[in-house]
Structure formats: C-alpha cells, structure tokens
C-alpha cells in the first residue's frame, strides 16, 4: 500500500474515533463550548494540507461507544484505536484514554516533498499531573517540559519522531521536528502577524456548536468538486462534521470560502428531507447526467438502455431528473425541451398510445427476426415507456405508476424552481445503493478496510449532495451527507 494512504487512514480513523458524539446540536443552538476559541488553535502552523479539530469529551466518546455498540464491536474499536496508536508510536500502557486526554485535539498533515509520505502534526491537551511518560510508556522516564524529545523505540515502528510538552500541558508531536518548532513559533508570534495565517478561527466560528471538524482544500479525490467548470482557489475549504447517528457515522460536508463571512448561513435548510425519500429510489440525480454516467453504468440494465439514456442526456444537457430502483429507471424532463421522436435509437421501434386522465401513455417496442448459423431466432428489445403530462415527459423502462406521477412532478418542479434563470449549475444527487456509491465518492474506504481488515468494515449506506452556482459567484454552493456503517453486524 502507498505509504501516503497510511497517513490519511490514520488521520481519518482518529477522526472517526473522536467523532463518536451523538447529534445534539443544531446550527442555531448556542453552545458554551465554542470550538473556534480553543487555545490549541494558536499552535497550528500555516500551510497545512488537512486539518482536524475536536473538543469532544473523552468520557462522552467512551459512553457513546458503550451505549451504541455490542461488546464484540467495542473490543474491535479498541483494537482499531490501539493499532493506530501503535503505528504512531504511542503506548498508553496501563492508562486509560479518558484519564489522560483533556478534551482538545488537533491533527494536521503537511506535504513532504522529499519523501513519499505526508508529515503529520498532532497536538492534544493532557490533564494535570500527566506527562509524556504516560503516553509513551517507555522503560526509561524521559518527560521534561519545554524540551524537544526524540521518540525512539527499538525494533518498533513509530511514525511520530519527536514530542514536546508545553508548560500548559499541551503535547505537540510530529513526524517532522520542524513542524514542532513551527508550532512553538506560532504561539509566540505577535497576535497581529499571527492573525494573517491562523485564519481557521473565523472559519470555525461558523461551526462553533460542532465538536469534530475536518478541513481540507485538496479537492482532487472529490469527483463532484474536482471539475474544470468551477476551479476552486486556496481560500475554499471543504468542512466535514463528524457525528454518530445510532451505530453509523454521519458526515456533513460544506464548501466554504475562508474570505467570506457568510459561512454556514448559505447552507440553511440544505439538508431537509426529500419528498421522494419515502419511495426509496436507490439512485436519484437531478440535472446533467454526463458526469453521473458512472452511476448509471452500475445499474443492472442492458447496453441499449444505457446508450438510450446517454443519448437523451446529450440532447437535453440540463434539468433532468433521473430515478432508479431495482434495475427500473425513470427519466423526467420538460416536455417542450425535447421530443422522444427525435431519438435515433427508437427510429425503427413500433409504438402504441392511449390517453387517460389527460396523460398520454406510449409504449415503444421492437421485435425482429435474426438469422444465426442458418437458424432463425426472435430478438426482442427492451421496451421503452413514455408518459406525457401537460408539462413533463416521463421516460422509463417500465410503466410508471399513475399514483407516482403527481409526486414526482412536484419534486421535479421543486428542484428546478427558477434555476433556468438563476443557476448555471444546479445539481442534486442521492445514492442509496452501496454498489453505486463506493468507492467513487470516498475513495479511501477500500484502503481503510484493507488496513483494518477483519476488524471493521466501513461502507456507505447513503450519499447525498447538492451543488449550485450562479453568477457572480466564483465557487459553487456544495453540501454533502455521507452515512458510514462501521460494522456489518
């Protein structure tokens, strides 16, 4: 495995462990624990690649694990935690996490141009009367405050190479000595100068009621944001919130601009329930399907249907609603934008139509005879159905239930709204079929599962995303939800 993945896996796994907090805060609820005011932020050097911060109480983490998981799964999570700590070079020995950790944690990664591995800087606060010896558990005592100490374990791997304890009981440890020196320089820098590059505080203030936040401005692995149509700048950050929902981890991600004060306000009501959720469509995509072909390709439909859907999309370009469940699919679009008669793949199909309740129902079918090795065989193509309402066309590979037409129509018009006049980018996607989701949107899942094989099995049960942009906005509004299942049982 590429060593860079180990860095990412370690950071994300720690995020998951410290993300075990029941969802209990709304965007408008005031919390006395403002994450943007943590002193630990003053130690963060600039130019980091990824950044995770948490002020979740260790007792809360322990209680939530005990409450939500069976004994077997609790033991597996403990094994996962111990594996991560062992890789880092930390060893709690007989100590318990909740007896040492004092509810402040920051993890940042940095590009190492000389090695095929990212450097990591981890800062966390420990309780009074605790020191470096309590977290390294070495044969010889080495703790000494305000002194840079090299970590050495004979014949053992330790990713973290250096450690430092401040006089206010913050542990600063890293794979790179320079990062610790930068962190110490950061706390001593004049406030007016530091303000220029400790810019996370304002950004975090928009999420001050949250307790586990991951930030990155590396969009290469995000298929929806990594697009030439809306290049993102270094001021744009993807902010992901970690929470525990029942036995799953719920991730909520927001694209924000660190130079704008609007923050999370732009995303109010973005996560409201879709009226079609109750229909349990496994794939729900609104607007251009061109960059969604990978999801359509995963549906168990034949090549003719895939080509047919792509032909329609190429002609319409936008304002398309695509729904799929159990290999059945429906494509909805504005009636006056496109006529099915112009579709080349249906040119030699027979059709039959009926009218009911002001809707016109049409079936397209094709049966032909073929000669193969002097044997005459019947060849039947998949039937295509069309329902024409006053304003919309419903194209599908099975007859649409009449009771669903009004429900789907309302959702289509709700999604479209005034988008034709306002948005040049307006897309919504909801995936519930695991085979259509992973590992396309969170590409590191396979690597995490490989690293912790036979311990946990992270899988996505649902992925939702909304992405919109209008003139003169330089970056889109992007909101995503990911439900991660930790164990299969």
Image (cartoon, rainbow, N blue to C red):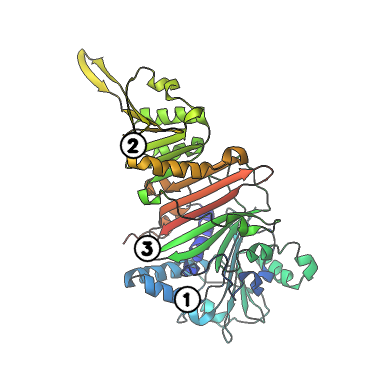
Q: Residue furthest bottom?
A: 129
**Of helix, strand and loop, which one carries label 3?**
loop
Mark 3 closeness class: few <14, some 14–19, many ≥20 residues within 10 Å: some
Expressed as whole percent of the image width and height from the top left, the position of residue 327 reads 33, 39
Q: Quadrant of residue 204?
A: bottom right
Residue 310 vs 29, above or below: the answer is: above
Expressed as whole percent of the image width and height from the top left, the position of residue 172 reads 62, 72
Give the alpha-carbon distance from disc 3 to disc 1, as whole Å: 23 Å
Q: Residue furthest front?
A: 357
Give the alpha-carbon distance from disc 2 to disc 1, as whole Å: 49 Å
The residue that mark 3 highlights is: 455
Q: Earlier in the sequence, mark 2 or mark 3?
A: 2
Q: Nearer the viewer, residue 173 or 152?
A: 173
Q: Nearer the viewer, residue 59 or 339?
A: 339
Q: Residue at x 38, y 58 (%)?
A: 457
Q: Quadrant of residue 390?
A: top left
Expressed as whole percent of the image width and height from the top left, the position of residue 489 reads 31, 62
**Of helix, strand and loop, which one carries label 2?**
loop
The residue that mark 2 highlights is: 400
Q: Residue at x 75, y 65 (%)?
A: 195
**Could you tell me if the residues under marks 2 and 3 are in contact, i.e. CB atoms within 8 Å?**
no
Q: Earlier in the sequence, mark 3 or mark 1?
A: 1
Give the alpha-carbon distance from disc 2 to disc 3, as whole Å: 44 Å
Mark 1 closeness class: few <14, some 14–19, many ≥20 residues within 10 Å: some
Expressed as whole percent of the image width and height from the top left, the position of residue 306 reads 40, 31
**Of helix, strand and loop, which one carries label 1?**
helix
Which circle, 2 or 3, is nearer the viewer? 2
Residue 97 vs 489, above or below: the answer is: below
The residue that mark 1 highlights is: 60
Q: Earlier in the sequence, mark 2 or mark 1?
A: 1
Q: Which mark is residue 204?
A: none
Residue 85 in sight: yes
């Amino acid at each position: 495995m590429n060593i860079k993945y180990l860095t990412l896996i370690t950071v994300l796994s720690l995020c998951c462990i410290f993300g075990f907090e029941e969802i209990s805060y709304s965007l408008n609820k005031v919390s006395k624990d403002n994450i943007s005011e943590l002193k630990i932020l003053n130690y963060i050097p600039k130019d980091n690649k990824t950044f995770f911060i948490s002020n979740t109480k260790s007792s809360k983490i322990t209680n939530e694990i005990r409450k939500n998981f069976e004994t077997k799964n609790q033991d597996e999570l403990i094994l996962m935690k111990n594996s991560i700590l062992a890789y880092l070079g930390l060893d709690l020995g007989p100590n318990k996490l909740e007896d040492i950790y004092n509810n402040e944690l920051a993890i940042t990664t940095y590009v190492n141009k000389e090695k095929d591995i990212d450097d990591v800087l981890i800062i966390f606060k420990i309780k009074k009367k605790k020191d470096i010896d309590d977290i390294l558990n070495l044969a010889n005592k080495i703790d000494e405050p305000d002194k840079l100490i090299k970590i050495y374990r004979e014949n053992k791997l330790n990713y973290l190479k250096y450690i430092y304890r401040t006089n206010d009981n913050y542990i600063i440890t890293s794979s790179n000595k320079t990062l610790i020196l930068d962190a110490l320089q950061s706390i001593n820098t004049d406030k007016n100068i530091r303000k220029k590059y400790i810019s996370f505080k304002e950004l975090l203030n928009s999420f001050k009621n949250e307790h586990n936040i991951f930030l990155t401005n590396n969009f290469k692995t995000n298929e929806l944001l990594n697009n030439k149509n809306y290049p993102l700048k270094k001021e744009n950050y993807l902010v992901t919130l970690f929470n525990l929902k029942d036995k799953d981890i719920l991730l909520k991600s927001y694209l924000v601009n660190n130079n704008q004060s609007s923050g999370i306000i732009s995303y109010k009501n973005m996560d409201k329930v879709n009226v079609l959720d109750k229909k349990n469509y496994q794939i729900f995509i609104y607007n251009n399907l061109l960059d969604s072909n990978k999801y359509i390709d995963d549906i168990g439909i034949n090549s003719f249907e895939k080509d047919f859907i792509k032909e329609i999309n190429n002609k319409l370009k936008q304002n398309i609603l695509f729904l799929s469940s159990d290999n059945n699919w429906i494509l909805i679009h504005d009636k006056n934008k496109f006529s099915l008669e112009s579709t080349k793949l249906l040119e030699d199909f027979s059709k039959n139509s009926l009218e009911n309740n002001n809707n016109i129902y049409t079936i397209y079918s094709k049966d032909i005879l073929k000669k193969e090795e002097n044997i005459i065989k019947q060849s039947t193509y998949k039937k295509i159905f069309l329902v024409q309402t006053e304003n919309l066309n419903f194209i599908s590979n099975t007859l649409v239930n009449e009771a669903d037409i009004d429900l789907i129509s309302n959702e289509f018009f709700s999604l479209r709204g005034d988008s034709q006049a306002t948005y040049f980018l307006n897309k919504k996607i909801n995936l519930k079929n695991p085979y259509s989701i992973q590992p396309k949107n969170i590409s590191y899942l396979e690597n995490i599962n490989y690293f912790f094989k036979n311990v946990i099995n992270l899988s996505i049960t649902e992925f939702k995303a909304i992405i919109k942009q209008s003139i003169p906005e330089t970056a889109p509004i992007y909101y995503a939800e990911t439900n991660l299942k930790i164990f299969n049982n």
